[in-house]
């Protein structure tokens, strides 16, 4: 009988009585083969893009039998393969620290599978007779204690973002010195987590605020837009509210004059009335009516004062209608402001006369109108004139005392209002030449927006 060889290390298995005289040499050879298997080291050279086949020969020192296989320095530019023989069961250490582009190298059994390198490092593997299996850190049991981790060994690239959770951090573990500039971005901050107690005094400066579309600058009487987070998202210089109005001018003298605005005025408020119509007159028990009141209105008039001159405008105060002997009264004249006219109050018409008494017919003159007025204050009927608006402020003497004939036989001196229609002559015995009462003139009262 002759010797056979072991499947894994190819050792010579001698038959009893065989190899007389050479038993010692053969035994020593087997011991060398075992030594190579458990302590052998050999450097091999790879050719990029080819296959290097390690061999295991019976009872012969062979490169595939070594414990440690070191790859000589080389650049692996293309797919390269290193194989070990099939049908052996053995532990290996592969040293790939001298390789460039080691990810192009695969180590495997001749017919089975193996693994592809991912870095120029040292790899452990074992062959199970069919495939070559890598022994990597992520497949090893046990734990790694803090003492086994070198300082700064765990880098940012080694930490999966989702693995760092709140319960992995000790209170106050993350300090300002541990946070890189610009590392905390908007999407890393949960709004509810940022409370006043978490912020150091003066810690949020201009460079920490999110930019908006607002242009830096000073704004006067600003119009601003604020979003739900309290940020100013739009800003523009606005305009102040209108100054208060103050009384500056009044006139009731019939005729035309010129108004000059105060410097800075941009808007006028006018109270105006047209003149009243004259009352009717006549002898005997005929029907006669009073003159109508002038139209009364409030006007809002915007103006533009060309620099350097202030705004000016002509105005006309209407004269009251004059009575006619033994006939109806004449109408009052209109009061106007501006050229072209910006405000008008027409005069009241004269009272009517009828040859027979007609108590059921209103013979009073019709009231004037205030066309285009911001507020029409003309009275509905009668002849009381302007009750409030045309009087102006207290003490401005826009009421006047005139001698009128509320009754022809009872002349009186009494206060009457501008724009009031004249009374009719209603007694039984006046002379035919007696006239109906003259209507009161119109008036204008002006306020300007100049009071800050």
Image (cartoon, rainbow, N blue to C red):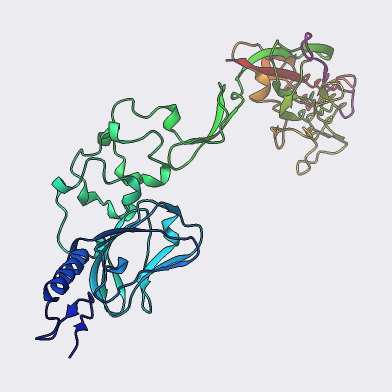
Question: Within the magenta stretch, is there residue 317?
Answer: yes
Work out whether residue 199 can be spotted. Answer: no
Q: Residue furthest front?
A: 21
- Residue at 28% x, 55% y is 163
Viewer-closest of 283 and 365: 365
Could you tell whether 192 is left or right of 237 in the image? Answer: left
Question: Within the magenta stretch, is there residue 243?
Answer: no
- Where residue 344 appears, as percent x and y from the top left, is 80, 27
Viewer-closest of 7 and 19: 19
- Residue at 50% x, 64% y is 49
Could you tell whether 298 is left or right of 84 in the image? Answer: right
Quarter-wise, where is residue 104 in the image? bottom left
Quarter-wise, where is residue 215 in the image? top right
Could you tell whether 211 is left or right of 147 in the image? Answer: right
Viewer-closest of 101 and 379: 101
Which quarter of the image is occupied by the C terminus?
Answer: top right
Which quarter of the image is occupied by the N terminus?
Answer: bottom left
Image height of 77 relative to 435, above or below: below
- Where residue 249 appears, as percent x and y from the top left, is 70, 12
Image height of 448 relative to 190, above or below: above
- Secondary structure, magenta segment, majority class: loop
Viewer-closest of 372 and 108: 108
Could you tell whether 350 is left or right of 250 in the image? Answer: right
- Residue at 36% x, 35% y is 180
Work out whether residue 291 can be spotted. Answer: yes
- Residue at 27% x, 46% y is 154
Image height of 57 relative to 246, above or below: below
- Stretch of the chain drawn in magenta: 306-329
Q: Residue furthest top?
A: 308
- Where residue 346 appears, as percent x and y from the top left, is 82, 29
């Amino acid at each position: 009988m002759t010797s056979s060889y072991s499947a894994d290390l190819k050792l010579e298995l001698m038959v009893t009585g065989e190899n007389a005289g050479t038993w010692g040499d053969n035994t020593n050879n087997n011991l060398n083969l075992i030594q190579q298997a458990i302590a052998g080291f050999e450097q091999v050279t790879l050719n990029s893009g080819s296959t290097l086949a390690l061999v295991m020969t019976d009872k012969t020192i062979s490169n595939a039998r070594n414990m440690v296989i070191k790859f000589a320095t080389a650049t692996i530019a293309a797919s390269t393969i290193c194989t070990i023989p099939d049908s052996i069961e053995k532990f290996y250490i592969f040293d790939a620290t001298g390789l460039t582009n080691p990810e192009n190298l695969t180590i495997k059994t001749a017919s089975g599978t193996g693994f592809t390198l991912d870095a120029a490092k040292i790899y452990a593997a074992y062959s199970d007779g069919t495939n070559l299996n890598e022994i990597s850190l992520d497949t090893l049991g046990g734990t790694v204690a803090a003492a086994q981790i070198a300082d700064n060994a765990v880098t940012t690239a080694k930490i999966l973002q989702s693995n760092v959770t709140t319960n992995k951090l000790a209170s106050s573990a993350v300090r300002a010195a541990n946070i890189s500039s610009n590392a905390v971005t908007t999407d890393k901050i949960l709004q509810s987590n940022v409370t006043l107690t978490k912020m150091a005094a003066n810690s949020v400066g201009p460079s920490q605020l999110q930019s908006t579309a607002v242009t830096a600058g000073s704004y006067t009487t600003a119009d601003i837009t604020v979003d739900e987070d309290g940020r100013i998202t739009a800003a523009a210089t606005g305009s102040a509210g209108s100054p208060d109005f103050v009384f500056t001018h009044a006139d009731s003298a019939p005729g035309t004059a010129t108004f000059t605005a105060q410097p800075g005025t941009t808007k006028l408020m006018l109270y105006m009335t047209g003149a009243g119509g004259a009352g009717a007159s006549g002898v005997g028990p005929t029907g006669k009516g009073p003159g109508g009141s002038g139209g009364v209105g409030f006007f809002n008039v915007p103006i533009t004062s060309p620099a350097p001159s202030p705004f000016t405008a002509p105005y006309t105060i209407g004269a009251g209608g004059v009575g006619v002997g033994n006939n109806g009264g004449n109408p009052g004249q209109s009061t106007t402001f501006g050229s072209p006219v910006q405000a008008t109050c027409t005069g009241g018409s004269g009272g009517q006369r009828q040859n027979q008494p007609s108590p059921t017919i209103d013979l009073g003159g019709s009231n004037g109108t205030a066309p285009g007025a911001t507020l029409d204050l003309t009275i509905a009927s009668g002849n009381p004139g302007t009750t409030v608006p045309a009087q102006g402020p207290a003490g401005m003497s826009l009421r006047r005392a005139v001698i009128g004939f509320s009754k022809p036989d009872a002349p009186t001196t009494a206060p009457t209002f501008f724009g009031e229609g004249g009374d009719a002559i209603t007694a039984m015995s006046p002379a035919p030449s007696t006239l109906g009462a003259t209507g009161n003139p119109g008036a204008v009262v002006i306020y300007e927006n100049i009071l800050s």
